Image: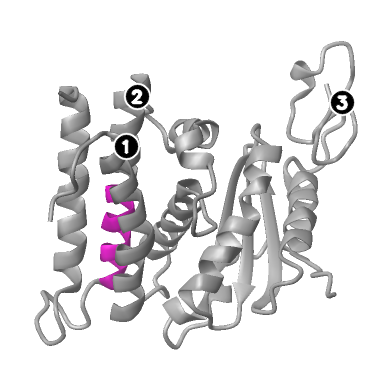
Amino acid sequence: MIDLRTRLHLDKAERNRGIARALIGRPGVSISEPPPFDWAVVVGFYAALHYAKAYLWETQRFYADTHQALQRRMRLTVFFASVRREGYSLWHYYRRLRSLADQARYHPHFVGTRPLVVALLDDPLERIRRAVWEALGLLPRR
Amino acid sequence: MRCQALRRPVCPRWSAAQVKGESVALVQPGSELAHALGLELAEAIANESAAREVWAWGASDRVELWVLTEPTDADTEQRLYALSAPLDDRHPEVDLRVHVLNPAWYGESDPKVIIPSGAERIALPRR
């Protein structure tokens, strides 16, 4: 049985993941045209953040109240720092998501495209998600 | 106490109060460190043909680095973030942010516009 705080982080992460996907919509069906690809990137990053927080709370009872503290702990945690079969660590994926979210949030020139955002949500975010769910002994939801 | 980036006893970003017994002249806090980290990043990505430019900017409490690329694919973008990650481990005392600026995310705009005017361009070693 996982801790309540872990569960809340996982719920928040799953919710953000769903919102990110809903924001990009489907071709021709979106809340705006063009769809808010920038916000999908931002919300996708916050899904990754809550997956990371869920893992760190469940395994270390570590809670970070700043990005810097969270990232420092991630770098020191083998689960995030170790390079995986595909040649990257979860930390590598996370820092890409963080950087793109910063670019998307603060810079008006950042626009994105559907294929780029879909790939971002399907690859780095999904890899973090699956790794955390599996490490916690849970099956990822559909 | 030594600054790993500059390989000398003090970092420009440290205040004089932190270096007991020494009087430290601070030269543009952060910029010298940013330059040093920019050189490390340029060296780390030198073999990446998609990388066009490296830029560095530092303030007293943080360093930002940018890698401007050709329009490139997700694999190359991810690889550049991975190649820059060892800087985090070598400089845990620095609030370091590395951004890969891939024009593919910027539509008709040039992503270079987001690099602040005070940033320094770092030469990329070509092999």
Q: The residue marked by circle 2 belongs to what chain?
A: A
Q: Position of residue B5 (x, y in %)?
A: 80, 41
Start-end of magenta stretch: A37-47
Q: Residues within 10 Å of mark 3 (few under 14, many from 20)?
A: some
Q: Locate the C terminus of chain B and report the quarter of the image it occupies.
A: bottom right
Q: Residues within 10 Å of mark 1 (few under 14, many from 20)?
A: few
- Identity, as a three-letter code, of the amino acid under mark 2: Thr
Q: Position of residue A127 (x, y in %)?
A: 35, 55
Q: Residue at x 46, y 40 (%)?
A: A80
Q: The residue marked by circle 3 belongs to what chain?
A: B
Q: Residue furthest top?
A: B21
Q: Earlier in the sequence, mark 2 or mark 1?
A: 2
Q: Is residue A74 above or below residue A2?
A: below
> Are discs 2 and 1 less than 8 Å apart at CB?
yes
Q: Is residue A55 magenta?
A: no
> Are discs 3 and 1 less than 8 Å apart at CB?
no
Residue A36 visible in the picture: yes
- Magenta part, dominant SS: helix
Q: Nearer the viewer, mark 3 or mark 2?
A: 2
- Label for residue A135? 1
Depth check, front residue: A55 or B114 = A55
Residue B114 visible in the picture: no
